[in-house]
Image: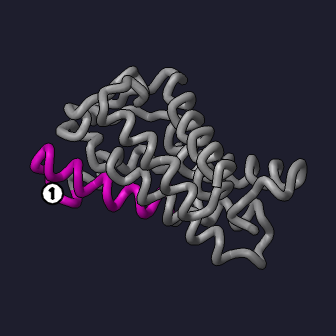
Amino acid sequence: MERNIALIAVFAALVAALGLLPPLMLASGIPVTAQSLGVMLCGTVLGARRGGLAVLLFVALVALGLPLLSGGRGGLGVFASPTAGFVVGFPIAAFATGFVMERLSRMNIGVAAGLASVLGGIVVLYIIGMLGFMLVLSKGPVETLMILGVYIPGDLIKAVLAGVITAGLARARPQSVLSRS
């Protein structure tokens, strides 16, 4: 129990720390950040339940006003911005990534982590993020996809990184990849 709580806190801190990397702001108003890599790693390393809880803790801290999102953003105003759907989708994406990772237990761990990151950390996150974007900015689905589609190549790179990092962690400390236990 205590170990789970500590891991959840550490991975919430990892997502926050990845927000310290300077964001690349595109014209759509949504920053390209490393935080979605943290969301993917929460799922691939911790599994569905613990990974989702780690990112839920992170989002709760953001809602309380801590400036943990990339660019030092935090507070309830974040949930009325074009990024609201992505922030709300972070815990769901971490859970989905972990869920897929747990189901791919017979697959090579790096490949499984990369695939889980694509399905949970990109597909699930984009569905929720796009819905939020469309609601906040009153855009249609095609226009939203055209605006947000420029982020997909970068997110695919993050999914590959999540696979490589998870595989490296599994080689160094196999017992630490809880999505496989």
Magenta segment range? Answer: 120-142
| Residue sitting at the far front | 2
The answer to whether residue 38 is left or right of residue 141 is: right
**Quadrant of the snapshot with the C terminus:** bottom right
Q: Residue 43: x and y, percent?
A: 59, 57
Q: How many marks?
A: 1
| Residue sitting at the far left | 138
* Residue 125 included in the magenta stretch of the image: yes
What residue do we see at 59% from left, 48% from top? 5
Circle 1 SS class: loop
Residue 139 or residue 50, whichever sits in front: 50
The overriding secondary structure of the stretch rendered in magenta is helix
Q: How is the image coloured?
A: one colour
* Residue 94 included in the magenta stretch of the image: no
What residue do we see at 49% from left, 21% from top? 22
Residue 118 or residue 27, whichever sits in front: 118
The answer to whether residue 141 is left or right of residue 124 is: left
Above or below for 38 versus 97: above
Q: Residue 41: x and y, percent?
A: 62, 49
Residue 149 or residue 165, whichever sits in front: 165
Classify residue 46 by image quadrant. Answer: bottom right
Return the residue at label 1.
140
Q: Amino acid at mark 1?
A: Gly
Count residues near mark 1 (Cα–Cα under 10 Å), then give few for <14, some for 14-19, many for 20+.
Answer: few
